[in-house]
Image: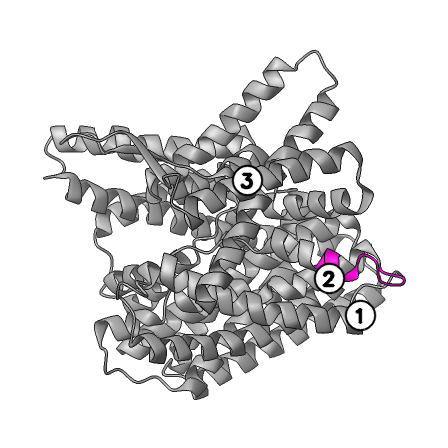
Amino acid sequence: MQRQLTVRGLIIGILGLLVITASSMYVALRMGALPWPTVFVTIVSMAALKNRKNSTLQEINVTHTLMSAGAMVAGGLAFTIPGIWMLNPQARISTGSLMVLTICGAILGTLFTTLFRKDFIEREQLPYPMGQAAYNTLIAGTTGGGPAKKLFAAMGGSALFTVLRDGFAKIPAVLTPFAGTALFPAFSIWVSPMALGIGAIIGPVLSLIWLGGAVFGYYLLTPIGISTGLFADMSAADLFRSNLGIGLMVGTGLGVFVKAVWSRGRQYLQDKKASGKSPERRRLSAKAKYSALALVVATVVILTVGTEISLLQAIVVIGGIYLTTYLSGMLTGQTGVNPMEVFGILVLLVVQVFWHPSLIAAFSVAAVTAVACGLTGDVMNDLKSGHMLGTDPRQQLLAEGIGGVIGAVVAVIVLLVMKQAFGGFGTAELPAPQAAAVSAMAGGLGHVPAFMIGAVIGLALHLCSVPAATLGLGIYLPVYISSIMGSGAIIMLAVRACTRNKDQGKVTSGSNLIASGLLGGEGITGVIIAIISMIR
């Protein structure tokens, strides 16, 4: 077997992890956004290992898997926990409880990812644009030639564009060609090479469904609702629309559960009739299941003892994390977007149906869920590139688990240091907008009927194999994000139509390389700008 998880890779990965986790915490609190670090850590790992004796692509792949793990753990924490101090600056949550929440979230995210990997990556072959970009970067960086020139030229142009936009404010981040009226919301588009590349990579079907959700929510539902008196004003329309989008994503989660129960039932009956499975495989399968169950039980106990989450609440939370990590893996694969704080809100809302948790317990539920979902999105991107490279997924998952736990400790320390240094959150220095959104939702849903309608529709669409979560994401997210994603898909369609008479395989490969370069250039530059800002 080729060298994959090595001692030198472990050391390099951990050193990079410390920097990436700290900078991700800063940028999540300061900017309310978190660029995927996947391509950045791929290049760092490649630079550190490429010329080392006996190095392999798989070793580089496993190293960057470990290096990126802490970024999304930091995001899950930054997008939720600061809301505690926004609502009550005097609130006290112990460092130990924060460590327990974050480490448990990292463990659960890694554990549940092992259950979904084969479905999403091998059976459904979801695109995972960040994973593809990492693969293309690694192949181009080690082989050179024409493909490398295309990818790195696009990457350089994207990086320069991002520096001018974010570093020197010479380019606007968002363009608004239509300012809006009393009936129609403003139309804007995010000026982002990365988002353009994501839209191109995930393909026209998913991108246009995403864009279709935005068109329906903003430019059909809103004006029709206001003109007919269904909504009193634009604010009421926005409340209905956002809850409808959340409902569609929750409905997809319910559909996942229904399909899983149905599938397991059918499999049980088939296994009962057929005896094709050897006793040895049954024992191994049972051993793996018992180990996973023991880990889940241990996590429930640790959450109950180490946090303000009660035993019954912890059991419900684990079930909620199972469903939301599935949704996280699916949405990341379909769209390249992972709304981890939304998943934290969803599980919190379920808990609030049965209990009235304390402020600390409520945010603890949201935090452990968001951390688990954040790590799931990250590891699924890495597993996609690993699958394309032929990397052993067990070694990747082990690296991700190590990185997730170390990243959890680092993220908590950096969060508390920044709170002490800046005096709190929700300020001009550290606005933490996602945590503010969680704070607003901590009191419950803003529009229950819209949420229920969305849940029913989402369930029905998912059972019919329609990507309802992607549609809901378009309805929920700001229109400037959906418009740029759709633009990327439309440009890709136009390029392929103009080159229809050429070798289609070469055209597709070349356009994917360019898209990967656009995506990677902004992602890398965003991480570097975050590190520089943190140091300042």
- Mark 2 and mark 1 residues within 8 Å of each other at the beta carbon: yes
User: Relative to residue 45, is residue 132 depicted above or below?
Assistant: above
Question: Residue 447 vs residue 467: left or right?
Answer: left
> From what the image shows, is residue 209 above or below residue 127?
above
Disc 3 target residue: 158
| Mark toward the viewer: 2 or 3 | 3
Nearest the eye: 425 or 493: 425
Mark 3 residue type: Ser
At a point 49% along the width and 33% down the height, the residue shown is 207
Q: CA distance from mark 2 to mark 3?
A: 26 Å
Mark 1 burial class by Cα count in 10 Å: few <14, some 14-19, many 20+: some
Which of labels 3 and 1 is toward the front?
3
Crowd class of label 3 (few under 14; some 14 to 19; many from 20; radius 10 Å): many
As helix, strand or loop, the secondary structure at mark 3 comes to helix
Pointer 2: what residue? 62
Q: Which mark is residue 6?
A: 1
Task: Give coordinates of residue 477: x percent, y percent.
Answer: 35, 44
* Chain part drawn in magenta: 45-55
Q: Nearer the viewer, residue 79 or 237?
A: 79
Q: Is residue 260 left or right of residue 119?
A: left
**Left or right: residue 153 compared with residue 241:** right
